Amino acid sequence: MWLSAQLKKSISITLNSSNMQKVLSIFLFALIMVGCSGTTSVSEQPQSPSWVKARPNVPDYYVGIGSARKTTPDYQQAAKQSALADLASDISVVISANSALNAFETHQGFFEDYTSNIRTEVQKELESYEVAGTWEDQQNYWIYYQLSKETYRRTMGQKKSAAGAKALDFYDKAITANESNDSKSALLLLIKALETIKPFINEDISVTHNGKQIFLGNEIINTLTNTLNALTIKGPKEIEVMLGHPIKSGSLSYTVVNDREIPQKLIPLKMIYSEDINPSSTAITSPEGVASFAIEAVRSRKSSVALKIEFDFASVIKEVTRDFAIGKILLRMKVPVTETHITIIRPKFYVTSEEKNLNQTNDKPILAETFKQKILAMGFPIANTPAEADYIINLKANTQPSGRSGQYVQVNLNLQVNATSREGNTVYTFSNDKINASHFTPEQAGISAYSTAVKRIQNTVVSELIERIIKGDRLY
């Protein structure tokens, strides 16, 4: 113990005397370095550039700034797309009074809606923009684009001039097609012309045509309108048809002519219909300008329906372009249309029957009367003679003993229903030999079976027959 204490004292005295100065020097140096290191970290924290904090105003440049969270997949590309959209929004969109877009007499909401489409086109056309800066921190990435206004004006001027020249060629060919009485070709060429100038649809495009200065966009729309307005669809105004019967194509033929009364070929027409009529919905005019439709069966229970025959402009547009914005503009245009009113005649029924109970003819034809009452209740007339009828219904019924059960006599009623058209074709059949009944006497059992048959006719048979006729179904 004494030796250990003396040793510690000796070491302490040695340190205090000879090495104390060195130890203190090292300690102080390390302390100063730690302090300096902390100061440097704070003072060298990078600061975000001014364009991140506030949008810069650069008179000679369009500006686009985009950002994206670093948690976004491919965040740098997302930021670039955001910056391009921002750059496009910095370019003002003005709808010129002499532009194709302004040629539409439409509401303000349409202009506002289409302005967003124009900005999309502007973004597609952007080029020659420069990266003016990028910056990022731990959470976000920013990029700054700028585009010289003079460069943009010059580039777009060149593109507009080239588009105008190409569209003018389409327009000139469309005029020639109209002069040659080929409305379909004229429409296709005019749509091509409009699609060509789509990036500049809100601007005036001044060109020279046949020595005259014209605003091309305006003229394209005006010529499209005039070409459509010159077309007329001629066809039957009224048709009568029996419910459940077809309308053959010969009865629904339509001719398309221009304002010179020249038939127009390859014009697509569509039939717009109401209720339960199901026609072949589209047709194209022949070289003679004729298109025909057919209806499998007229099924509406109304007394009349209207068929609207309309120029199928949408299909013409799709032959040229699938561009949604162009289609949206063109489908606002008025197209030629005509109507055919169809008067629906309800068929008359003549009902005849042979009704027996145990091979003896009944005093009253209860089944035939039930059939007539149900037909009348469903809104169909009854004919007094077969010659007046469109359909003849023949019923046959008879009961036969089938055994006994204790004191009760059992019988079966066999019921057969056959409906034929005026032409003698079978349109409906029904047969049932399992209508059973029992009573104390065979005659009363037969009467009970007839009561069951009456309910069957009221609840099922007549409805099935009428439904078969309405649907136009045939057994032959």
Image: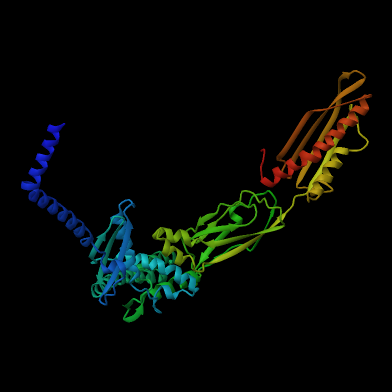
Residue closest to the eye, 24 or 209 = 24
The colour scheme used here is rainbow
Tell me what residue is drawn at x 56 percent, y 57 percent: 271
Above or below — where is 332 with respect to 22? below
In the rendering, at what x and y percent does residue 163 appear? 30, 69
- Please identify the quadrant where the C terminus is shown: top right
Residue drawn at x 27%, y 77% is 59
Residue 75 shows in the view: yes
Residue 312 horizontal side relative to residue 420, left or right = left
- Residue at horizontal 44%, vertical 63%? 327
Task: In this rendered view, identify the residue nearer to me: 98 or 429.
Answer: 98
Viewer-proximal residue, 47 or 433? 47
Looking at this rendering, what residue extends furthest in the bottom direction? 212
State how many labels appear. 0
Q: Quadrant of residue 79?
A: bottom left
Q: Quadrant of residue 450?
A: top right
- Name which residue lies at 83% across and 37% down: 455
Residue closest to the eye, 95 or 359:
95
Image quadrant for the N terminus?
A: top left
> Where is residue 428 shown, x and y percent of the image?
72, 38
Say if residue 196 shows up in the picture. Answer: no
Q: Is residue 62 left or right of residue 396?
A: left
Q: Position of residue 255 (x, y in %)?
A: 54, 62
Q: Is residue 369 above or below residue 47?
A: above
Q: Residue furthest left?
A: 18
Horizontal arrangement in the rendering, residue 8 relative to residue 414 (left or right):
left
